Amino acid sequence: MRILVLIHRPLRSLSTGAARVIHDTYTGLSKLSHDILIVSLSRKGDETNININELQYIDLREDILSRMFLLPFRMLTAASREGLSFLQLSIMPKIYEKSPKILNKVTKIVKKFNPDIVISELIYMGFLANRISMETCSDFIIRSHNMEAEYLSILAPNSMHILLNHLIYPLEQKILLLPSRVITLSYRDALLFNKIYKLDAKFLGIPLRKLPEEFACERDVEKLNLKPYNYFLFTGSLHKPNILVLREVIRAAKYLESKSTITIAIAGSISKALPKSRPSNIKVLGIVPMKVLHSLYTYAEASIAPIFQGSGVAIKLVESLIYGLPTITTRKALLMLPGLKHEENIYITRNIDSFIKDVQTLVEDTQLRETIKRGAQNFSKKHLNYQKILRRYELMLTAKL
């Protein structure tokens, strides 16, 4: 089976987030003997075909008119720290579909590849993917990572919510109602899509691959001045929902500073948001390579992954569960991943106000941590098995062929 994947931004860091999900999904499918071609569009695309772990990948450069039209919106996105990104995203799908030069570039590649299936990762390549699928008589699938209107409203200022809803909700609905099948990364999103947009969206699980145990190295952890099994790990990208969580993590660390020897290790670009004046039990790691992140998860005592806002699924939550870590999160996680139970395989904090106390409980109660750890390991085996999830994807992809 030949699978063409269209994404609206280049694949950069593959260690976490959406890029990690995309990478792990399609490298897994390629090992099941499927041919994969991933094509992205960006203003700096070099248009060369490169190999990423057996995946063919091409980052196409936008034509000059598309770049000129999108430039002011990209400047607004950067100036607002993604707060106004919905303006750019609301027009991008139509520009990509209508631009003759972009269509010609993609069509030229598609004719050589001759796909059986065209997949739009997120909704923003939906119009273009639909057009390509019709021209090639290919099956068309959209994989949604979030309810975009809900997710973007978290990033946007409150004063912009009316405009955002006016632009994004109709766009999301129009794209999702194209003649396609829809996959989500969250059980909650599948339910909401089915309820709001009257779709038969499918939640198949989150295909994340854990590196082999032997790749983990205590020395990686010790080089970061951490003691194995004596730190809680918090990792994330630098965006608004994680910044909100970071503030509470700092408060929790300050409260625990004189009460425990546990360190709170903070990795990822979210580290940039840490103030210079911070509790001594916080260790700033910054962005680390995938192998080091693997070691950090392997030798962590617990993980912090609350979801106070957002849709989709928090990749850091899934990563924590794959490693069988006792993880503190919020009630939203129960809707995103079926089978999670408080104090059985996860620890649920009710709200921001109870977060500090709940972190303290998990720090002090070693027996509770062990119970949750065993439960998380069982949950991972049952619900997050990488090969089983890939097989579900494969069954859905081949259902109409």
Image (cartoon, rainbow, N blue to C red):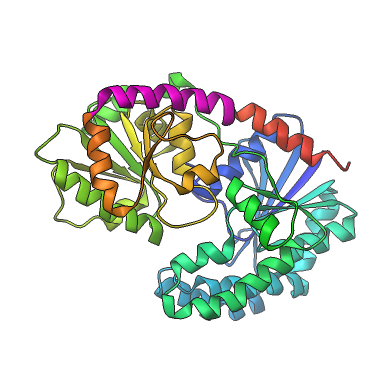
Relative height, residue 47 to residue 327 (above, below): below
Check the image and name the residue furthest to the top: 214
In x, y percent, where is residue 179? 83, 59
Residue at 42% over, 28% down: 344
In x, y percent, where is residue 357? 23, 43
Between 259 and 243, the one lying in front of the other is 259
In x, y percent, where is residue 323? 44, 28
Residue at 11% over, 36% down: 259
Residue at 63% over, 71% down: 169
Question: Would residue 187 appear left or right of 14 to someone viewing this image?
Answer: right
Check the image and name the residue furthest to the left: 258
**Magenta residues, dominant SS class:** helix
Q: Quadrant of residue 325?
A: top left
Question: Would residue 283 appear left or right of 179 to someone viewing this image?
Answer: left
Q: How many marks?
A: 0
Magenta stretch: residue 346 in it?
no
Magenta stretch: residue 377 in it?
yes
Query: Can see residue 122?
Result: yes
Between 204 and 333, the one lying in front of the other is 333
Between 75 and 138, the one lying in front of the other is 138
Query: Can see residue 67?
Result: no
Q: Quadrant of residue 305?
A: top left
Question: Would residue 166 appear left or right of 277 to someone viewing this image?
Answer: right
Residue at 14% over, 33% down: 260
In x, y percent, where is residue 193? 67, 57
Q: Quadrant of the C terminus?
A: top right
Q: Quadrant of the N terminus?
A: top right
Range of magenta residues: 365-383
